[in-house]
């Protein structure tokens, strides 16, 4: 049995590596909106998301020679955007509650909400997401929108996988509560 590596060759990236200025612009136009939205979902601030977008593209273009086509350029860039977004949150003193260090009597019981009674509208959900604490919103976004698993989230946010799971469940309940109230 022969093992072969899957390569995600991208002609636009190859032209950028050769220094073609128009290809840099085209690559930016191709990914800017999606990467901005990815960052905005994490940092919840337009100005910060714009900064993350610019920093991420600057880093990607600066280190483009390190891109080896082992993944798509979009996946590689998205990882840079997510990491830069998390760094913004860390600068804001992002606080996670580690349940392994929290006494049992301080952990609140979360009541189950009837999901069928909640009318899920996009704008209502966006507003409710914006009201979540940074830690909750980060974990929820990385898991549901960005497709990371608990172990990857734990690594990205420098927390335990158990804390990531707890943050997700609390975020989901808080989001449902906000939607029910709103």
Image (spheres, rainbow, N blue to C red):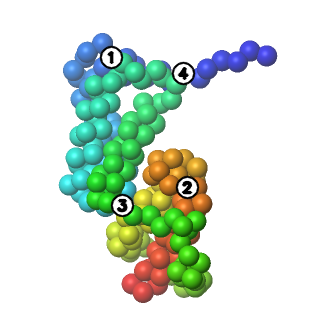
Q: Residues within 10 Å of mark 2 (few under 14, many from 20)?
A: some
Mark 3 or mark 4, which is nearer to you? Answer: 3
Quadrant of the image containing the N terminus: top right
Tell me the SS state at disc 4.
loop
Q: CA distance from mark 3 to mark 4?
A: 37 Å
Along the viewing direction, whichever of 119 and 46 lies nearer the viewer: 46
Quadrant of the image containing the C terminus: bottom left
Q: CA distance from mark 1 to mark 2?
A: 38 Å
User: Which badge, 3 or 2, comes first in the chain's sequence?
Assistant: 3
Residue 51 marker = none
Q: Which residue is mark 1?
A: 17
Task: Confirm or deny contact between disc 1 and disc 3 (CB under 8 A).
Answer: no
Task: Confirm or deny contact between disc 1 and disc 4 (CB under 8 A).
Answer: no
Q: Which residue is mark 3?
A: 94
Expressed as whole percent of the image width and height from the top left, the position of residue 23 reads 28, 23
Q: Which residue is mark 2?
A: 160
| Whether residue 68 is visible | yes
Q: Is residue 19 left or right of residue 151?
A: left
Q: Quadrant of residue 64?
A: top left
Expressed as whole percent of the image width and height from the top left, the position of residue 6 reads 59, 23
Q: CA distance from mark 4 to mark 2?
A: 32 Å
User: Which badge, 3 or 4, comes first in the chain's sequence?
Assistant: 4
Q: Which residue is mark 4?
A: 7
């Amino acid at each position: 049995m022969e093992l072969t590596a899957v390569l995600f060759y991208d002609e636009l990236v190859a032209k950028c590596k050769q220094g073609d200025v128009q290809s840099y612009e085209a690559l930016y136009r191709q990914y800017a909106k999606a990467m901005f939205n990815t960052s905005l979902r994490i940092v919840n601030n337009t100005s910060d998301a714009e900064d993350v977008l610019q920093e991420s593209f600057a880093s990607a273009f600066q280190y483009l020679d390190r891109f080896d086509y082992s993944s798509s350029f979009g996946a590689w860039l998205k990882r840079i955007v997510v990491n830069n977004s998390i760094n913004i949150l860390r600068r804001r003193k992002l606080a996670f509650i580690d349940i392994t260090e929290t006494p049992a009597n301080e952990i609140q019981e979360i009541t189950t909400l009837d999901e069928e009674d909640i009318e899920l509208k996009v704008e209502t959900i966006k507003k409710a997401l914006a009201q979540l604490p940074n830690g909750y919103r980060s974990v929820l976004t990385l898991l549901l929108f960005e497709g990371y698993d608990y172990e990857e989230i734990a690594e990205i946010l420098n927390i335990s996988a158990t804390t990531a799971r707890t943050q997700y469940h609390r975020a989901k309940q808080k989001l449902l509560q906000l939607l029910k109230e709103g």
